[in-house]
Amino acid sequence: MNSFIGWIGGKKLLRHQILEQFPEPGAFDRYIEVFGGAAWVLFSRDKHAKMEVYNDVNGQLVNLFRVVKYHPEALQKELDWILMSREQFFDAIQEVRGLTDIQRAARFFIAIQESFGMGCSSFGVRSKNIGNAVEFLRMASDRLQSVVIENVDFERLLKTYDRTGAMFYLDPPYYEAEKYYPDRFQPEDHVRLRDALANIKGKFLLSYNDCPEIRELYKDYVIQKLDRWDNLAAKTKSRRYRELLIKNY
């Protein structure tokens, strides 16, 4: 199934190629998405393992996932009569104190759905049936019922869930593209991530942009190159975007 939202750097276009690189079924008993985002890979299967974990450091995103999991009907009610509207979008991104978790989730959902490129900063001038997106929340809730939802730094998450039977999928902010993400990933965090992964007992699959710096950081691992159409490029100037899948198995 699809995710219920889009997100910066989402893996909608590459999810099937990513899944092809996963270990054989039964080779792991816990699946952890470390930089969860929209969780396109998580949603791509009915279940990856007996235990599944979604994590992101963005508190607004995690609150939305928790509300979808536990209170989908209340969230849908809060989103009644939402339209693709510039006024509603700018109302949603204004900071307001004293909101409930459900109200915050509704506003953030509107901000994502109605913004350009899921950036939550500028209105996306396009036609879109928001009602269909709201209706889909019930299905997303069903998929998340047995998923553990975390909101911690990647290093802490790796230490908490690492086992020999663990499978980590990681999709961090890409090298020199950190500024496009709402939660800033510092250049030194790329090295910190590499060092943290070097010490785990489980398996990992890592998505990155293809650049000399990342190839050098992960030169001791299996690296596979793939590419996709750059979906942010103008249709008249479409180009291929090179990415890497890096794994320790």
Image: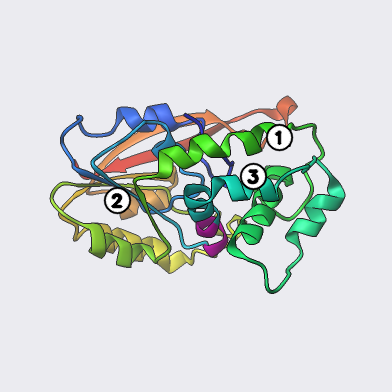
Name which residue lies at 85% across and 48% down. Answer: 86
Quarter where residue 143 is shown: top left
Q: Is residue 121 above or below residue 235?
A: below
- Looking at the image, tell me whether mark 3 or mark 1 is earlier in sequence order: 3
Disc 2 residue type?
Answer: Tyr
Disc 1 residue type?
Answer: Gly
Q: Position of residue 141 (x, y in %)?
A: 48, 42
Q: Which residues are magenta?
A: 59-63
Q: How is the image coloured?
A: rainbow
Which mark, by number, is residue 76? 3
- Element type at marker 1? helix
Badge 1, how many Cα within 10 Å: few under 14, some, many 20+? Answer: some
User: For mark 1, what is the residue?
Assistant: 131
The reply to whether residue 65 is in sight is yes
Name which residue lies at 40% across and 27% down. Answer: 16
Disc 3 residue type?
Answer: Gln
- Looking at the image, tell me whether mark 2 or mark 3 is earlier in sequence order: 3
| Quadrant (top left/top right/bottom left/bottom right) for the C terminus | top left
Question: How many angstroms separate mark 3 from mark 1 (CA)?
Answer: 9 Å
For discs 3 and 1, the disc positioned in front in the rendered view: 3
Question: How many angstroms separate mark 1 from mark 2 (CA)?
Answer: 44 Å
Does the magenta-highlighted stretch encompass residue 47? no
